[in-house]
Image (tube, rainbow, N blue to C red):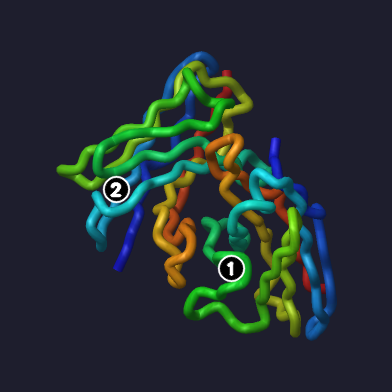
Amino acid sequence: QSVLTQPPSASGTPGQRVTISCSGSRSNIGGNYVYWYQQLPGTAPKLLIYTNNQRPSGVPDRFSGSKSGTSASLAISGLRSEDEADYHCAAWDDSLRGLVFGTGTKVTVL
Amino acid sequence: QVHLVQSGAEVKKPGASVKLSCKASGYTFTNYYMHWVRQAPGQGLEWMGIINSTGGSTSYAQKFRGRVTLTRDTSTSTVYLHLTSLTSEDTAVYYCARWGVSADSRGHDLDYWGQGTLVAVSS
C-alpha cells in the first residue's frame, strides 16, 4: 500500500508533453524533497530527478520536476519512444520514519 | 564504477524464510547506507528498511517489523536481507539500493540499484 498517489497511466504521441502527478501529505512531500525514478521494462529503477527538480548527469533536459505544497509533478516534453517506462515518485516520511513511494505511473508512447 | 550485485532467484514454500545478499563494489562500503525495496508483480515499489553499513544500525518499515532483519558484513562489502514466515504476498523482486548524498548536497537519493532478486513463494 503506497503512501504517495500517482495516476496509473499516462500516454502521448511522439513530441507531446506528458505530466505525471504525485500527491502526498505534510509528513512526506510537504516537508521533504521529492525524487523520481524511471524503470524501463524488466530493469531496476534509475534515478531521474533528485531534490524536487534536479537532473543527474546524463538525464535529458526533456525531463523536469516540480513541487508545490504536498504535491509534485514530473513532466516529459518532446516525448520519445524510449521514454516508455514506469515512473515512481519517492520522498522521506517523517511520521513513518522511512521512504515512501508512489503507486507508479506507466507511460505509453502511442 | 559502483556495482551492486544481488544473489540469484529463490523459490520458497509458505512459512519458510529467505536470505538475500547484495555485494557492493567500486566505492567505500562503510560510507553509505543501503536500502531494500521490493516490487510485487505489476505493483509499485515498497520500502522495506535501511541499514547503516558502518555501525549496522537498522530501521524497518512497520509492515515488516518482526519478520525482516538487515545485516552487513564489512569484510566482504555485503548486505543481507532475511525475511521469515513467507506467504504468497511476499512474491516479489527485491532490490538493494545505495543511499547517496544528492549531487547538490541537499538531499539523499537511491543512486545505485542492484539488479534485483526474484523471490517466488508457492506451495
Disc 1 and disc 2 on one polypeptide chain: no
User: Quadrant of residue B78 in the image?
Assistant: top left
Tag in front: 1 or 2: 1
- The chain carrying label 1 is A
In terms of depth relative to the viewer, which is nearer, B58 or A59?
B58
Q: Residue at x 84, y 74 (%)?
A: A12
Query: For the residue carrying disc 2, how many other residues have a C-alpha within 10 Å: few (<14), some (14-19), or many (20+)?
Result: some
Q: Quadrant of the C terminus of chain A?
A: bottom right
Indicate the secondary structure of the residue bearing disc 2. Answer: strand
Q: Amino acid at mark 2?
A: Lys
Residue A15 lies, in percent from the top left, at 79, 85
Q: Residue at x 60, y 54 (%)?
A: A32
Q: Which residue is mark 1?
A: A49
Could you tell me if residue A66 is visible in this image?
yes
Could you tell me if residue A39 is visible in this image?
no
Task: Give the side of residue B43 with respect to residue B62, left or right.
Answer: right
Q: Quadrant of the N terminus of chain A?
A: top right
Residue B16 lies, in percent from the top left, at 46, 17
Q: Residue at x 54, y 32 (%)?
A: B61
Q: Which numbered dot is residue A37?
A: none
Q: Residue at x 55, y 75 (%)?
A: A55
Q: Which residue is mark 2?
A: B23
Q: Amino acid at mark 1?
A: Ile
Task: Give the side of residue B32 with respect to residue A39, left or right.
Answer: left
